[in-house]
C-alpha cells in the first residue's frame, strides 16, 4: 500500500496546477491541507482493516489516501466530473479505493452498502460541503442506511447545533434529529487556515455514533419530526401556536392544548425548551389521539 502524499500545501498546489483545476463555488470546495487534522479525523473515526468507509466529496483524494491506509475498503462519491481524472491519478496504487461519480443525494446508499459490504454497517467520513451538510446527514439517518458512525468536517456552528441541548439559542430541529439517531461528540475545532481556499467560517470535526436503537420510543417517527420542525419554524410562538400554524400537522387547537397541558409545562411553553423525551411524549400522545386511543390521561 502506498503512503499518503497529499495533506500539505505544496503537494496540493502541484496537483491543482497539473490539472488546471478551478474551484467550483457551487460545490463548496475547500480542500484540507493539514496532516495533523487528517490524522485526528482518521483516529477519531476509529477505522480498522475490517471497515468499509464511505467518503462523501473526496476532492483531490487527500483524506481518501489516509482512509485507504486504515480501512479495508473505501468507496468515495464525487459529484464534480473535473475531479474524477484527478482522483484516478492521486489514488493510483491505493487498490482498496473505488470512486463513484455521482450526486450522493441521488444515490441509493442502502443498496450500495448491500452490494459493497454485504449490508454490514459502514463508517462514513467526509469533509462535507457546508451548503448540503444537513440534507446529507439526515438522509443517511432517515433512510436507515446501515451506519456505525459518521465522522465529518462541518461548519463549527452546525457542529455546535448538533450537540447542544434545550434552552440554548443553537438548539433546534437539527439538534433533536441528530440526537434521536446518534450520540454527537465534537472532536476538534479547525481554523480556516487548514483549508485551500480558506473558508470564511471556522470548522469542526464531529463524530456521530449511531445508537443501537433510538433513545426514545415513538409510535410514529414521521409525526415526531413534523412536530419538531413545526415547533422551531416559529421559535417566538408558543408551542401550541407553532403546532397549530404548521401546514404539516392537522390537529384542532383544543387537541393541541390538551396534549401540551398533559406535559405539565404550562400553556405558554415554547418548543425550544422541550427535551427529546418530551417531544416523544407529545408525539405519542397526539398519535394516540389520531387513532382515537387517548383520553384525558397525562404522560406517564
Image: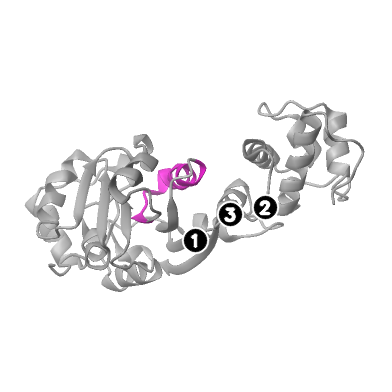
Using the rendered image of the protein, determine whether residue 275 is visible from the camera's viewpoint: no
Q: Which residues are magenta?
A: 123-142
Position of residue 132 in the picture relative to residue 194 (left or right): right
Q: Residue at x 14, y 60 (%)?
A: 94
Q: Could you tell whether 128 is left or right of 215 in the image?
A: left
Q: How far apart in space, not on screen, are marks 3 and 2 (Cα)?
A: 8 Å
The crowding category of the residue bearing disc 2, from other C-alpha atoms within 10 Å (few below 14, some 14 to 19, many at least 20), is few
Task: Please name the residue that numbered disc 1 is placed on.
Answer: 209
Q: Quadrant of residue 35?
A: bottom left
Q: Position of residue 235 (x, y in %)?
A: 70, 43
- Residue lying at the far left in this picture: please name it: 18
Q: Main secondary structure of the magenta part?
A: helix
Q: Residue at x 19, y 57 (%)?
A: 96
Relative to residue 142, is residue 300 depicted above or below? Answer: below
Q: What color scheme is it?
A: one colour
Relative image position of residue 137 (x, y in whole percent)? 46, 48
**Viewer can see residue 203:** yes
Say above or below: 223 vs 73. above
Depth check, front residue: 196 or 264: 264
- Where, by quadrant of the figure, is residue 236 drawn? top right
Mark 1 vs mark 3: give the one in front: 3
Secondary element type, mark 2:
loop
Secondary structure type for disc 1 = strand
Say which of 128 and 282 sits in front. Answer: 282
Q: Residue furthest bottom?
A: 36
Disc number for residue 145: none
Q: Are marks 1 and 3 in contact (CB under 8 Å)?
A: no
Where disc 3 sits, the SS reads loop
- Quarter of the image for the N terminus: give it: bottom left
At x 32% / y 68%, what residue is drawn?
48
Residue where numbered disc 2 is placed: 216
Badge 1: few (under 14), some or many (20 or more) residues near its Cα, within 10 Å?
many
Amino acid at each position: 500500500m502506498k503512503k499518503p502524499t497529499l495533506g500539505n500545501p505544496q503537494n496540493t498546489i502541484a496537483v491543482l496546477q497539473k490539472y488546471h483545476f478551478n474551484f467550483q463555488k457551487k460545490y463548496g470546495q475547500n480542500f484540507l491541507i493539514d496532516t495533523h487534522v487528517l490524522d485526528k479525523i482518521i483516529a477519531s473515526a476509529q477505522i480498522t482493516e475490517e471497515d468499509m468507509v464511505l467518503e462523501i466529496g473526496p476532492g483531490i483524494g487527500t483524506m481518501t489516501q489516509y482512509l485507504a491506509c486504515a480501512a479495508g475498503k473505501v468507496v468515495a462519491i464525487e459529484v464534480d466530473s473535473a475531479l474524477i481524472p484527478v482522483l484516478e491519478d492521486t489514488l493510483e496504487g491505493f487498490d482498496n479505493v473505488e470512486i463513484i461519480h455521482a450526486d450522493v443525494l441521488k444515490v441509493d446508499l442502502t443498496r450500495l452498502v448491500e452490494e459493497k459490504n454485504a449490508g454490514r454497517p459502514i463508517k462514513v467520513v467526509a469533509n462535507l460541503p457546508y451548503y448540503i451538510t444537513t440534507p446529507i446527514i439526515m438522509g443517511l439517518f432517515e433512510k436507515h442506511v446501515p451506519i456505525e458512525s459518521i465522522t465529518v468536517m462541518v461548519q463549527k456552528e452546525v457542529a455546535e447545533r448538533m450537540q447542544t441541548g434545550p434552552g440554548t439559542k443553537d438548539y433546534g430541529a437539527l439538534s433533536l434529529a441528530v440526537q434521536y439517531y446518534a450520540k454527537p461528540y465534537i472532536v476538534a475545532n479547525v481554523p480556516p487556515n487548514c483549508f485551500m481556499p480558506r473558508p470564511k467560517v471556522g470548522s469542526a470535526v464531529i463524530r456521530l455514533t449511531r445508537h443501537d436503537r433510538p433513545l426514545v420510543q415513538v409510535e410514529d417517527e414521521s409525526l415526531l419530526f413534523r412536530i419538531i420542525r413545526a415547533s422551531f419554524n416559529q421559535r417566538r410562538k408558543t408551542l401550541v401556536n407553532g403546532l397549530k400554524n404548521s401546514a404539516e400537522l392537522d390537529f384542532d387547537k383544543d387537541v393541541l392544548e390538551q396534549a401540551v397541558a398533559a406535559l405539565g409545562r404550562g400553556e405558554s411553553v415554547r418548543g425550544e425548551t422541550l427535551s427529546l423525551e418530551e417531544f416523544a411524549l407529545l408525539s405519542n400522545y397526539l398519535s394516540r389521539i389520531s387513532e382515537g386511543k387517548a383520553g384525558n390521561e397525562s404522560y406517564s
